[in-house]
Image (tube, rainbow, N blue to C red):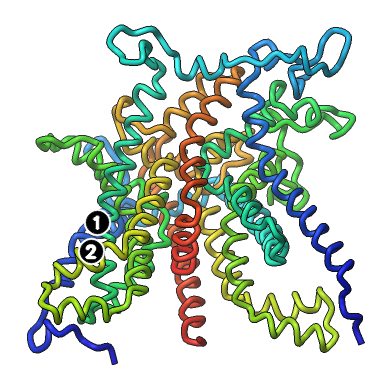
Amino acid sequence: MRRIPTVSRKSWEHSLVNGALIVVCILAMLPIATTVLISFKRQEDITRKPPVIFPCDTSTQSFDASACRWAVEGYQRVLAPKPSETSPLGFALTGNMFRIYVPNTLLYATTSSLLVVLLAGMSGYAFSRYRFRGRGALMTGILAITGVPLLTNLLALYQMGVTLRKAHLPFYDDRIFIVTVYIGFFLPLSVWIAKGFFDAIPRELEEAALIDGCSPIGALMRIIMPLAMPGMAAVFLLTFVNVWNEFIAGYLLIARNDHKPVMFGLYEFLGQNIINLQVIAAACILIALPIVILFLFTRRTFFKAMVEGAVKG
Amino acid sequence: MQRSLPHRRGRRNFLPFWLILPTLVVLFAIQVYPALYTVWLSVQQREPSGWIFVGLKNFARLRNLSQFGESIGHTIIFLVGFTSLTMIAGFFVALLLNRNVRLSGFYITLLFIPWTIADLLAGMVFRLLVVPDYGLLSGILQNPAIFPPNGLSVLTAVPPRPWLGSFPFPPAPALVYLVLAATWRALPFVTLLLLAAMQTVPQEIIESSRIDGANGRQVIRHILVPLMLPTMVVALFSLTLSGMNGVGMIFSLTGGGPGSSTELLSYMLYVIGWNQLNFGRAAALALMIAVVNWLLISGTLRVTRLEEKSR
């Protein structure tokens, strides 16, 4: 017979689990913490040999908290604020990162997420509510495409981009192309997430509205859409983060530098700042922070979408 | 068995087709057509006069490249290291979180931050630690007393001499860093997936096996792992897929170097396509990667189907 666990053994076990989890969390946070640390260093502390972890040593002591040399030089060089008469804040951010790349990415991420929500909402609803010929085949097809990564299609997409650019279509530029590419790649997963959320809404609600004389579109707009809002928000957030974090397509498929997205900006920084590690670190923090904050505020939605998506794709 | 909506009784309803049509158009233009285009590209070669048909020459040339075999070796080492490390670590973190300690919500939130960070950014974050001479840890890593004979440095170290013929093992330090960085970023995803599967294992089964005298390791080995197997396979395939095709981290952490010691197939595709501007040969490589991708995807589909049926 096994001994029944006593209270003291249980609490001992709990603190062991807690301790292990704290170690895991520290390990997970360590690379971020070191990046924050580096971003606040000065150039002369970055290029010292051998490197010091904390820039807090003096000629007499190896660590003196009052002598720490922290600086925001890295952030200044990323943002490059210059006084400006026209800007309402009295200064303008003249660094390429916040003048060109961040606005570009905001534009791409917002447009592609909104369009993905619209398209995934429409087809997710159709797959959830209607039984029609070819439904199973189409769903399997979309499910199969869900896992296909961008990489292997990039060569063909690049050639398509070149052809379209040469065609001199009115109002066309690479920005339309890249948004379409992002939609095409993040849509299949979103269709599945949307379908899952629609499946969870009871059909009876809709049928009651139809019996009461509501049109199918009216029922969709008045009954289903408000209930599906959390799901649509999850699709929007997931696509937004995916587009924000995407590098290789934005790097290769956009010809003009002033149309390139934020990850290209970071990659450019890496080439320009071989030894100015504090500048790279500051750029990393500034670009990761909005997404991390977004995640912290919306983590429930995120996890839901992620589990839903992972089970399918 | 599905009750039909009252309004479409009797006549055919075209609404679902119109609702799905835009999605199908976009998916055809961005996913299906480029895939077919890649097949066409793989048997073409760019000449000043235009594209000419060369049959399977691109594939033959690719196979004869010495870097190709080497790159397959690097990719295998990377994938084995990355997937096994992530799966094992993910399983144990999920096991810890499954104990439902009081702060587990807080731990989950903290642990998942790396997952929201872009792969390019994750590579940069790790690069800041190991850049030769200036990286935060380079003082320790480059110390010959700790890592004989010359210390380890990511971007300048000479790749080690292989043990097994031309198979690039042991890997260069840079490849080890790549594995660590990729694991750091993918761990939250796997942990969440495994935790979700673990929570569906009925507590009664575990308790009754405990009463029958099973110890912790036996419970994991004979109850948790078999019941979680479908999810584990899905996680493993999805990790392999992302490791096979994720290229951003290589760009920012190593740039394929030193030498070609971190040039995985995905990065080689970029080098052949955009550095050497040989699109035909790159398309041949893309097709080979796509075949592996398809095997993984259809494997995932099979597993999820089986799981759905068994419910």
Chain identity of mark 2? A
The residue lying toward the viewer, choosing from A303 and A266, is A303
Q: Give the Cα distance between marks 2 and 1.
A: 6 Å
Q: Quadrant of the C terminus of chain A?
A: bottom left
Quadrant occupied by the N terminus of chain A: bottom right
In-front residue for pair B279/B66: B279
Mark 1 chain: A
Could you say which quadrant of the image residue A129 lies in? bottom left
Q: Which residue was labeled with disc 1?
A: A118
Q: Which residue is mark 2?
A: A122
- Residue A61: percent from the left, percent from the top? 87, 13
Which residue is drawn at the image coordinates 70% and 58% (left, top)? B89
Up-down relation of residue B69 to residue B46 (above or below): below
Q: Secondary structure at mark 2?
A: helix
The percent position of residue B213, horizontal first and vertical second, equals 85, 85
**Mark 1 is on which residue type?**
Leu
Depth check, front residue: B95 or B72: B95
Q: Is residue B304 left or right of residue A111?
A: right
Q: Position of residue A39 (x, y in %)?
A: 61, 23
User: Relative to A196, does residue A26 appear above or below in the rendering?
Assistant: above
Which residue lies at the image location 27% right of the left edge and 10% below the top edge?
A86
The amino acid type, in three-letter code, at marker 2 is Met
The answer to the question of whether label 2 and label 1 lie on touching residues, with beta carbons closer than 8 A, is yes
Q: Is residue A156 visible?
A: no
Whether residue B155 sits left or right of residue B54 in the image: it is: right
